[in-house]
Amino acid sequence: MSGASSAGACASMAGTERAISLIDGNSFYCSCERLFRPDLKDTPIIVLSNNDGAVVSLTPEAKALGFKMGTPYFQIRDELERKGVAVFSSNYVLYGDISDRMMATIETMSDSVSPYSIDEAFADLTGMPEPLEEYGRAIRDKVMRWTGIPVGVGIGPTKTLAKLANWAAKKWRDKTGCVVDLRDTNRQEKLLKVVEVDTIWGVGSRLKVKLNAAGIRTGWDLATHDSAAIRRIGGVVLERTALELRGIPCLSLEDIAPVRQMIAKGQSFGVRIHEVGPLQEAVGSYITRAAEKLRAQGSVCGALRVSIRTGMFNPNERHYSNAMVMQFTRPTDDTRELLAAGRDAVAALYEPGYAYAKAEILLMDLSDRGVKTGDLFAPAPREHSEELMSVMDAINRRMGRGTVRPAVVPGRVKWAMAQNMKSPEYTTNLDELWQIPTG
């Protein structure tokens, strides 16, 4: 494949030819559910989004029946029942715990692992024993043996080619055994010539339209097109993607999950809320979770935005929506300070007589801890705040989310999102441990 004038900066990262792998759980949410329901081994499974809204994960058996990602549940409820599909509400506590176990297993096979999402991780296999397809199968077998989760393994000289190799591994799983090594340039060319351009990582439907208009229809077209023209269509990001398809590394293994500049939390309620108290509880629960993420990335928050609204599409309901930003004189990551601001914001926003359907919070003006100079006249930080938050986070990581929480955040609530088909939290809740029928 031809080079490009702007390839130098990317190529300088290459050094010894790299072998980057992407390990990805197959139908991950469904696999987590099937893990504790062996009776569903060959049964089509679908997992729904928050409030049982739409399909977010489905097994190949469900796809074969014609069901698709993103389809609203209410549209296919009867058909799912008629065709014998097992349906589950999202169980993020379970999925998160299984993800942690999967990532820990992958780390035993590579010294450099960077999780990309709950079910995906990039791992550097440079220097591992050849052939790497066999090593990839060893990773797959170990993850399956240790966690019960089937994965696909794609290997390439760049992250983008590793992602494409993973796609091919699962697309033709019967032929590949869910492992594909795409380091050979002949194999790269063969695959790129048959995949549509929107199969490539980062190329969505809108960008596909622009590329097709320029005569770029396949991955090979993108890889071999003039770099300056590519940059005019999709900017430097698309240009880097094209260079990575040529085998020129442009993204380091660690260049995957940048520190968040804002942290958002919120969801629709399972039932309408009419009183201010439950609204404050809901906002408090979102703030508590967001604060954990804030501390995990070593940041502090300078402002908190709180919004509440009714259902906006039911003509029989009165509509109301409002938001407020609370500024902090001193950036903070203390859950207690954030909760106090959130409680005051809800009290100011709340208007009686409405049926509230959703609340959201946004942690804004984030900065690294200790970087910003505080207001000279701001109140002093709470004594031992950092130590207290650290202990609370450590307990919750070890014992399960919500084990230790502020008293204003209830454990069980009536307003929680609808999860009428949620499976037990088998691995994190002592009251919901997996039970094997006897007799």
Image (cartoon, rainbow, N blue to C red):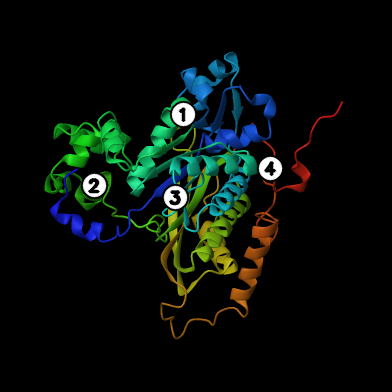
Q: Secondary structure at mark 1?
A: helix
Horizontal and vertical percent for residue 316?
A: 49, 31
What amino acid is labelled 4 in the image? Glu
Horizontal and vertical percent for residue 175?
A: 44, 26
Observer-side mark, 4 or 1, equals 1
Q: CA distance from mark 4 to mark 3?
A: 27 Å
At label 3, counting other C-alpha atoms closer than 10 Å, the crowd grade (few under 14, some 14-19, many 20 or more) is many
Observer-side mark, 4 or 2, equals 2
Residue position marked by numbered label 2 in the rendering? 238
At label 2, counting other C-alpha atoms closer than 10 Å, the crowd grade (few under 14, some 14-19, many 20 or more) is many
Q: Secondary structure at mark 4?
A: loop
Observer-side mark, 2 or 1, equals 1
- Among numbered discs 4 and 2, the one appearing first in the sequence: 2
Q: Secondary structure at mark 3?
A: strand
Residue position marked by numbered label 1 in the rendering? 173
Horizontal and vertical percent for residue 5?
A: 13, 54
What amino acid is labelled 2 in the image? Leu
Q: At 75% across and 38% down in the image, what residue appears? A: 434
Observer-side mark, 2 or 3, equals 3
Question: In this rendering, would 180 be left or right of 389?
Answer: left
- Residue lying at the far front of the rendered structure: 130
In front here: 177 or 76?
A: 177
What amino acid is labelled 1 in the image? Arg
Q: CA distance from mark 4 to mark 2?
A: 41 Å
Observer-side mark, 3 or 1, equals 1
Observer-side mark, 4 or 3, equals 3
Asked if marks 2 and 3 touch (Cβ < 8 Å), the reply is no
Q: Secondary structure at mark 2?
A: helix
- Among numbered discs 4 and 1, the one appearing first in the sequence: 1
Residue position marked by numbered label 3 in the rendering? 122
What amino acid is labelled 3 in the image? Phe
